[in-house]
Amino acid sequence: MQHLIQRKVLHMAARFMPTEEFWAALRSGASILVASRAVGVSPVCGYRWLADAGGWAGLGLPAPGHGRLEASVSARLRPLFWAELRKGAGVRAAAAAAGVSDVTGYRWFQQAGGVRPPTVNPEVEAQITPGHGMVTFTERCRVEDLLNLHYKPSRIADLLGRPRSTITREIARGTDQVDGSYRARIGQSKVEQRRHRAGARPRLVPGTRLFDEVVERLVAKHSPEQISQRLRLDFPADPEMRVSHETIYQALYVRPKGELAREVEQRLGEAKALRTGRVQRRHQGRQLRPKLKDMSSIHDRPAEADDRLMPGHWEGDLIIGAHGKSAIGTLVERTTRFVLLLHLPDDHTAQTVAKAMTAKITELPEQLKRSLTWDQGSEMALHTKITAETGIPVYFCDPHSPWQRGTNENTNGLLRQYFPKGADLSFYGPGLLDQVAAELNTRPRKTLEWATPAEALQRLLSNDDDQSVASTA
């Protein structure tokens, strides 16, 4: 029995005797804490071993200042620390992997500005394959794992081969309202619930009042968004007359030749149910033109024209026809988006444009003759004559700056529905131009809170008349 006790005492003594591994760690610049952990003893034991050896001087080593690692050791261990952070590890775990204390790890993290470096984990990324089609539950689990590893949504999108907006929407969909973290099962559950609701009765059913109303407005060339918002204004107390613009788009294009598309195309007698057949806007470049004489810059235009509170400030331009031989003049009022079209039967020279514009502007009331903004085209060479005969000052945009006439540019895009590019515009007479302008002026506009330009103009003119009567009284 005594023999066994002596053996156990000797074993324990040997267990707590300093080893060469401990001294080697200290000589390499590690702290007492790190060296003690390396050999599996407590820091108290490590400090006792160091004291028995005569301290740092007994080892021939300088004493570290306030627990800081030497520069050479820090330079060797920091890359290990940051490599673990890039793999998604926490600060404490990265510090332990680098062989430094938690305090040192947090100090390094704070010295770097407290910003976690971009996560790079080759082992995890090698297991990910880009997806296609609808987001699957497996991909949602990948998103959850990558977010837990501190990957950013943009990097997750690149790894999964998805648009960034798809990932951000998925994160918003699957976020737990309790702890704010993403859960794949929550996102999958919401998607399945939405699919179940999608099996309900469609909104646009042939023979219903809503279907007929949508058809009538599409035939009148209203956009789906205009139809959706205007129905809310025209039928405020009837929930059955509500439909989203996305539902109208899907009824026209997503479903193969749905009843809505066939009905509208039959009524229009053409293949396009919407105003434009383009899938994206085309860039419209402009050539540099010489400056006109005695012109006034748009920067000298009255400030009241910018805030769109006062009616009477117009923007104008030409729509050019086939081979540049024919044109139509367009004028749009900035506040109400009211449109006037100029008939240019033979050409679009300065003389023809000045004559047509003078005839049209003189028909306007005085409160609608405050300013006209145009680009620096040669058709406005007689702008001083226009001002002298109509009393409306003309201001010119900077070269290559169509956004300074944004309202007119947008209106010209709408007019291309009636006057397509490559057409001979001399074919359209003044009566047809007035009819097109009237159709645009009775179309609800989002920027007018779904009122029509004609309604907006009438309201402003009525307010001016009331103010005039009040001031006279």
Image: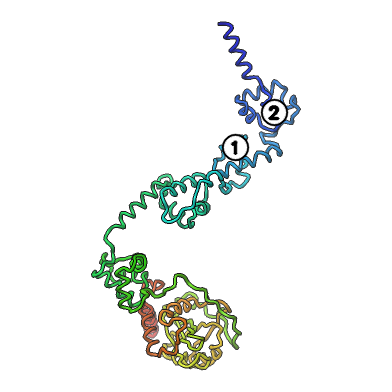
Please, which residue is most extreme toward the left here? 207
Q: Is residue 66 left or right of residue 387?
A: right
Q: Which residue is mark 2?
A: 24
- 253 is higher (above) or lower (below) than 96: below
- Which circle marks residue 57 in the picture? none
Question: Which residue does the image show at 39% across and 46% down from the upper left?
Answer: 185
Name the residue at 42% across, 56% down: 133
Q: Nearer the viewer, residue 328 or 358?
A: 328
Displayed quadrant of residue 227? bottom left
Count of numbered badges drawn on the protein: 2
Q: Position of residue 154 (x, y in %)?
A: 52, 54
Looking at the picture, which amino acid does disc 1 mark? Ala
Query: Which residue shows up at 26% across the image and 60% down it?
Result: 201
Identify residue type, mark 2. Ala
Quarter the C terminus occupies: bottom left
* Mark 2 surroundings: few (<14), some (14-19) or many (≥20) residues within 10 A: few
Specify the farthest residue to the right. 60
Answer yes or no: is residue 473 visible: no
Nearer to me, 387 or 73: 73
Task: Identify the residue at image location x=47%, y=79%.
Answer: 408
Compared across the picture, whether 210 is left or right of 47 comes to left
Report the residue marked by disc 1. Answer: 95
Classify mark 2: helix, strand or loop. helix
Give the mark nearest the N terminus, 1 or 2. Answer: 2
